[in-house]
Image: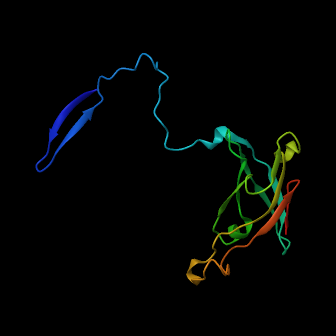
């Protein structure tokens, strides 16, 4: 690496130029820099389809992304259908260390695998203009369900 001094009108700083650098022979050509993002697609276990019928009788098919990183608990990502009716499309993240989650990709193959999740609640704020404190929870979505064998039921 070559270091070339660079002068500006009022300050002086050093400018580093990487031109002409060679790969460290010990590291070989496979050496790469650190990524600032994580590619979740490599750790996706599956995408089970969950059916849900709300109290008004409307039916939904919810796709749930199931991820498993090495050394980490299972992670689920899904859109809340109650928030989505209002156009918000809030994505919930549920982790196995907080809720009991079982997922078997080899069962219910036509539905993306068998998924069971302990009761959970959507906690997104639907209308921030109400100025209601989180303690009262009057403006929280409150979708409260459990998923049993790919069927979400109000709890």
Q: Is residue 134 above or below residue 48?
A: below
Task: Decide if residue 8 is on the left or right side of residue 82.
Answer: left
Colour setup of the view: rainbow
Residue 26 drawn above or below residue 39: above
Q: In percent of the image, x 86 and y 39: which residue is there?
A: 106
Tell me residue 126's x, y (percent).
64, 74
Q: Residue most toward the left?
A: 9
Q: Quadrant of residue 87?
A: bottom right
Residue lying at 63% horizontally and 43% vertically, measured from the top left = 40
Give the image quarter of residue 63: bottom right
Q: Above or below — where is 33 with respect to 149?
A: above
Q: In the rendering, at what x and y percent does residue 91 appear?
A: 66, 60
User: Quadrant of the image for the N terminus?
Assistant: top left
The residue that appears at 57% across and 77% down in the rendered structure is 128
In this view, the residue in front, 109 or 95, is 95
Q: Is residue 96 left or right of residue 22?
A: right
In front of the other: 135 or 15: 135
Looking at the image, residue 34 lies above or below residue 125: above
Say whether residue 9 is left or right of residue 32: left
| Viewport quadrant of the C terminus | bottom right
* Residue at (62, 77) in percent of width and height: 134
Tally of numbered discs: 0
Q: Could you say where residue 55 lies in the image, as x and y percent from the top left?
A: 85, 74
Q: Point out residue 99 in the picture as x, y percentages from the top left corner.
A: 77, 57
Question: Which residue of the protein is positioned furthest toward the top in this rendering?
Answer: 25
């Amino acid at each position: 690496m070559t270091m070339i001094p660079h002068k500006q009108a009022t300050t002086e700083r050093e400018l580093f130029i990487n031109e002409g650098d060679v790969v460290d022979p010990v590291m070989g050509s496979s050496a790469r820099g650190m990524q600032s993002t994580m590619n979740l697609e490599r750790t996706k276990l599956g995408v089970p389809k969950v059916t849900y019928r709300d109290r008004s009788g409307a039916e939904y098919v919810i796709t749930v992304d199931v991820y498993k990183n090495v050394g980490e608990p299972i992670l689920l990502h899904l859109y809340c259908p109650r928030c989505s009716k209002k156009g918000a499309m809030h994505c919930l993240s549920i982790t196995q260390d907080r809720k009991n989650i079982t997922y078997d990709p080899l069962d219910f193959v036509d539905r993306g695998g068998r998924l069971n999740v302990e009761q959970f609640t959507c906690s997104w704020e639907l209308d921030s203009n109400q100025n209601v404190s989180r303690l009262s929870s009057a403006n929280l979505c409150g979708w409260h369900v459990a998923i049993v064998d790919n069927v979400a039921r109000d709890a």
